[in-house]
Image (cartoon, grey):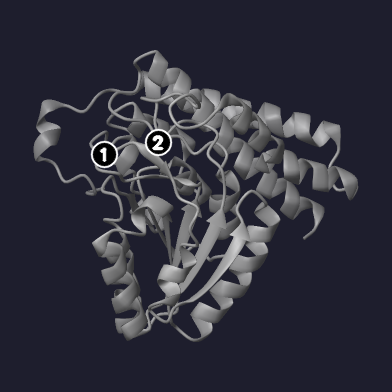
Amino acid sequence: MDRDDLLSLYRQMLLIRRFEEKSAEMYALAKIGGFLHLYIGEEAIAVGAIAAVRADDYVISAYRDHGHCLAKGSEPGRVMAELFGKATGLCKGKGGSMHLVDARRNFMGGYAIVGGHLPLATGLAFAVKYQKRDQVVLCFFGEGAVPTGQAHEAFNLAALWKLPVIFICENNRYGMGTPVHRAVALYSDVAETARAYGIEADTVDGMDVLAVRTLMKTVVTKVRSAPRPYFVEALTYRFMGHSMADPSHGHYRTKEEVEEERQRDPLLLLRRTMTNRGLGSEADFKRLEREVGEMVAAAVKFADESPFPARTALEEDVYAE
């Protein structure tokens, strides 16, 4: 990759990081209601994977969806407005944080039910194959979704019908899915679940955007040229809590553990690589910080000044434009 490619990847990850940090701030100010699940620490997966596909390929995500939506090219202002519940949001304020959709960019949504969107990804891939198109579908989810019944059904059908879907498990080691909805450490190799259905699988360092992009380039080429499902386990670490309802440490992680993992921050790793190779200067990073900061500030201003949906909006079609 050349200098411009690397700076572009860094800029996208920085945008997601600053957007998420600002979202947390707006949540604390009660500008954002409901639930808020932040992607801080996992940016390399969305950016690296989506950098390996075409604009017309499909992406679908779970409830931690802001990063995937932004990486797919959605306008930050409209994403923030959706979090604010405003009429100018991607779904006209009716979806909120966990249900972002930007169909014009083939970002087919975030979904709040754990594992509930895997069958939808399989359905999208079926439609692609049925219509004899060459698109691929990227399906992002956490490791907590792997034990769910619908995940196994999706893997099974995708394998039987040889569908062009790439299942990307963002394994941050703490899956939400116990009966009391508390975090539980999951250290098992989730890729084995996919292999049990005859699905080829790989594991990648999800903190390294270059490693993710390199693997995904290979996987996407395979799936596009000879349609069949593929499973990628991206080993990562979420720096924030599960949602704004729990702290970054204390319930199931120690402060020391989180701080240790922060030494492998995706932004830090890429910046170090670029600096060592002479492909990025301090001036470059300062410029990007300034540009991204202005972009996020503009997104908040746009969202704050936008109107809430009118009462009549309850009867309108969200996607009618």
Cα gap from disc 2 to disc 1, whole angstroms: 12 Å
The picture places residue 255, in percent across and down from the top left corner, at 58, 25
The picture places residue 145, in percent across and down from the top left corner, at 35, 55
Q: Residue tagged by mark 2? A: 78
The picture places residue 241, in percent across and down from the top left corner, at 45, 31
Q: Residues within 10 Å of mark 2 (few under 14, many from 20)?
A: many
Nearer the observer, 119 or 3? 119
Q: Residue tagged by mark 1? A: 95
**Mark 2 element type:** helix
Nearer the observer, 144 or 320? 144
Nearer the observer, 138 or 247? 247
Q: Earlier in the sequence, mark 2 or mark 1?
A: 2
Instruction: Say if 151 sits above or below 173 in the image.
Output: below
Q: Is residue 186 left or right of residue 7?
A: left
- The amino acid marked with disc number 2 is Arg
- For the image, the number of numbered tags is 2
Q: Are marks 2 and 1 in contact (CB under 8 Å)?
A: no
- The amino acid marked with disc number 1 is Gly
